[in-house]
Image (spheres, rainbow, N blue to C red):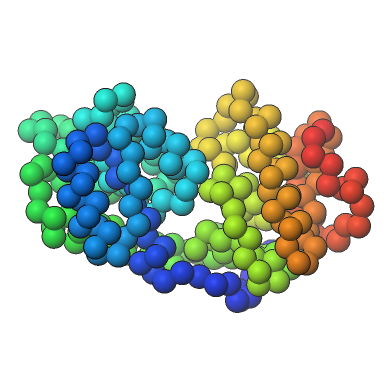
């Protein structure tokens, strides 16, 4: 059920919401760029390689990724494709390569912009602002099939700002917890298999990861139940998966964690 109005949630200012992931192993470039971006009001998370970048994306909200193609543990083009397919995060690629095909491939693999090194800091900052504005405008044009909010009882999932609240009280969630809750709230009382939830949470179906859903659901329940008002229950359907229920629950049985 989609909500047309959102109970009051304490949201940060627009600049505070802009968290950038900078993926580059070149220390001088990182130092200069990080200083410039933080001076402009952005939060900057630095990853020196692809492995650290993936960990940051799993654990933190990222509004835009900026990555170099030359990374010590992975091809930047592969990382670009992985980030876009798994997280849908806007991406700006920069590189000192003189191969024109790298820019073309980066854009085809999901990059929103490509900047050649050496670059002007003001030009890069302008491109970052432009990509972020396009992203916000795209989210704001969400149609009826993809509402801005999902509401189940007193729970509201704000898809535009990627937040959730119970009777106006914000629930702080990890990116994975948010994606799971958003999926469940999109179709209340409908059962999602673990494989479906894996696809929705991580961008691909992985049988080895499907049981990891149980762990994240348990943590999500704990956070929801820590609020001052009771949440709609997330119910485990034995042998199948999970659903979020529109009916109130007063029993611990409905909140059992594993089938």
Q: Quadrant of residue 239?
A: top right
Q: Name above or below for residue 11 compared with residue 203.
A: below
Left or right of 27? Residue 149 is: right
Does the rendering let one see residue 127? Answer: no
Q: Nearer the viewer, residue 216 or 27?
A: 27
Picture quarter with the N terminus: bottom right
Left or right of 255? Residue 194 is: left
Left or right of 108? Residue 190 is: right
Q: Name above or below for residue 126 compared with residue 87.
A: below
Q: Name above or below for residue 99 compared with residue 135.
A: above
Q: Position of residue 225 (x, y in %)?
A: 76, 56
Does the rendering let one see residue 58? Answer: yes
Left or right of 86? Residue 254 is: right
Q: Name the residue: 88% across, 57% down.
A: 249
Q: Name the residue: 19% across, 61% down.
A: 126
Q: Position of residue 186 (x, y in %)?
A: 65, 55
Total marks shown come to: 0
Q: Name the residue: 39% across, 48% down.
A: 89
Picture quarter with the C terminus: top right
Q: Quadrant of residue 194?
A: top right
Q: Nearer the viewer, residue 175 or 48?
A: 48
Q: Name the residue: 43% across, 41% down.
A: 56
Q: Position of residue 248 (x, y in %)?
A: 86, 61
């Amino acid at each position: 059920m989609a909500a047309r109005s959102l109970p009051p949630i304490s949201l940060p200012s627009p600049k505070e919401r802009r968290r950038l992931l900078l993926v580059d192993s070149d220390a001088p470039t990182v130092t200069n760029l990080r200083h410039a971006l933080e001076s402009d009001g952005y939060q900057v998370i630095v990853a020196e390689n692809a492995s650290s970048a993936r960990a940051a994306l799993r654990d933190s909200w990222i509004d835009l990724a900026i990555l170099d193609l030359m990374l010590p543990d992975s091809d930047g083009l592969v990382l670009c494709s992985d980030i876009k397919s798994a997280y849908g995060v806007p991406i700006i690629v920069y590189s000192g390569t003189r191969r024109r095909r790298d820019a073309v491939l980066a854009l085809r693999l999901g990059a929103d912009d490509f900047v050649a090194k050496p670059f002007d800091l003001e030009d890069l900052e302008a491109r970052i602002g432009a990509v972020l504005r396009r992203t916000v405008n795209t989210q704001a044009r969400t149609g009826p099939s993809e509402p801005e909010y999902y509401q189940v009882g007193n729970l509201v999932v704000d898809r535009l700002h990627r937040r959730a609240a119970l009777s106006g009280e914000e629930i702080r969630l990890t990116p994975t917890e948010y994606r799971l809750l958003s999926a469940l709230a999109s179709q209340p009382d409908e059962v999602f298999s673990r494989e479906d939830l894996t696809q929705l949470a991580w961008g691909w179906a992985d049988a080895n990861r499907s049981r990891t859903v149980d762990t994240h659901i348990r943590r999500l329940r704990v956070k929801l139940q820590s609020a001052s008002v009771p949440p709609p229950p997330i119910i485990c359907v034995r042998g199948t998966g999970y659903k979020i229920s529109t009916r109130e629950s007063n029993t611990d049985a409905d909140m059992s964690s594993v089938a």
